[in-house]
Amino acid sequence: MASKWPDSQVRREIYEFNLGFLALVCADGSPGVAYGLDPAIRQRLRLLAPAQLEAVAATPCLLAAFTNVLPPPAIAQGVAEAPLTADRETQSDAARMFAASLLAWLWHTARQNRLLAALCIGPGSLAVEHLSSAAFRDLQRTAAVAPGCLEARFCRHPRLWPDLVRAASMPAGPVLTATRLSVVQLALISRH
């Protein structure tokens, strides 16, 4: 089954964000949960060959998400006054750069293509509306705390990440395609 993308630029951008996020996940050496993923899943991702990680990154929607960072009420009230915590101080430069880039991309996407933004952020919530109406200054304030709100998309789903890693470790074929498409299905029906 060949997949068709309406816009190869968007496909490339999503792929690059996914690959960058997987690099963050694999680089995180903390023993506990990181970006919402259990240590066992992170270890399995680290063991994948570069081509296999690229296969995971080719999932046709974002693998990274933000929790509690997008709506303007959080921007206007919580972010501007958020104290500098030890967790924020220890965020890596790579995580800060990735989160700021993803946030800016989502903001631009929400202003230009609401359907794509809903696929990337999630349907059924006001997040796309709030993000598209946010001022650039609000976006800058949000970027300050965005790394601490970064997580693997659907990290609470019991099977998605284990299935995605397992499918990537197999020869390319229908299992990998079906697993990638299951992420799209979740993106269309889930708020997280």
Image (cartoon, helix red, strand yellow):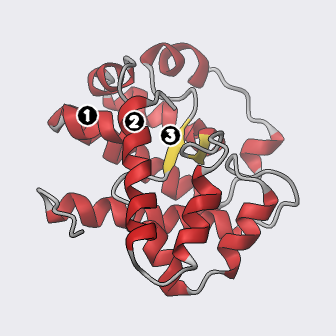
Q: Is residue 76 left or right of residue 132?
A: right
The residue that disc 3 covers is: 143
At label 3, counting other C-alpha atoms closer than 10 Å, the crowd grade (few under 14, some 14-19, many 20 or more) is many
Q: Secondary structure at mark 3?
A: helix
- Chain-order first, disc 3 or disc 2: 2
Q: Tell me which corner region of the image, top left, top right, bottom left or bottom right, holds residue 163.
A: bottom right
Q: Amino acid at mark 2?
A: Ile
The residue that disc 2 covers is: 121
Q: Amino acid at mark 3?
A: Ala
Please name which of the two marks, 3 or 1, marks the residue nearer to the observer: 1
Q: CA distance from mark 3 to mark 2?
A: 16 Å
186 in relation to 141, above or below: below
Q: Tell me which corner region of the image, top left, top right, bottom left or bottom right, holds residue 148.
A: top right
Q: Residue at x 30, y 33 (%)?
A: 118
- Cβ–Cβ below 8 Å for labels 2 and 1? yes
* 94 and 21: which is toward the camera: 21
Q: Is residue 35 left or right of residue 186?
A: right
Q: Secondary structure at mark 2?
A: helix
Q: Where does residue 109 sit, x and y in percent of width and height? A: 24, 41
Q: Which mark is residue 120?
A: none
Q: Amino acid at mark 1?
A: Ala
Q: Which mark is residue 110?
A: 1
Q: Residue at x 17, y 37 (%)?
A: 113
- Chain-order first, disc 3 or disc 1: 1
Q: How many marks?
A: 3
Q: Is residue 29 left or right of residue 56?
A: right
39 in relation to 134, above or below: below
* 149 and 55: which is toward the camera: 55
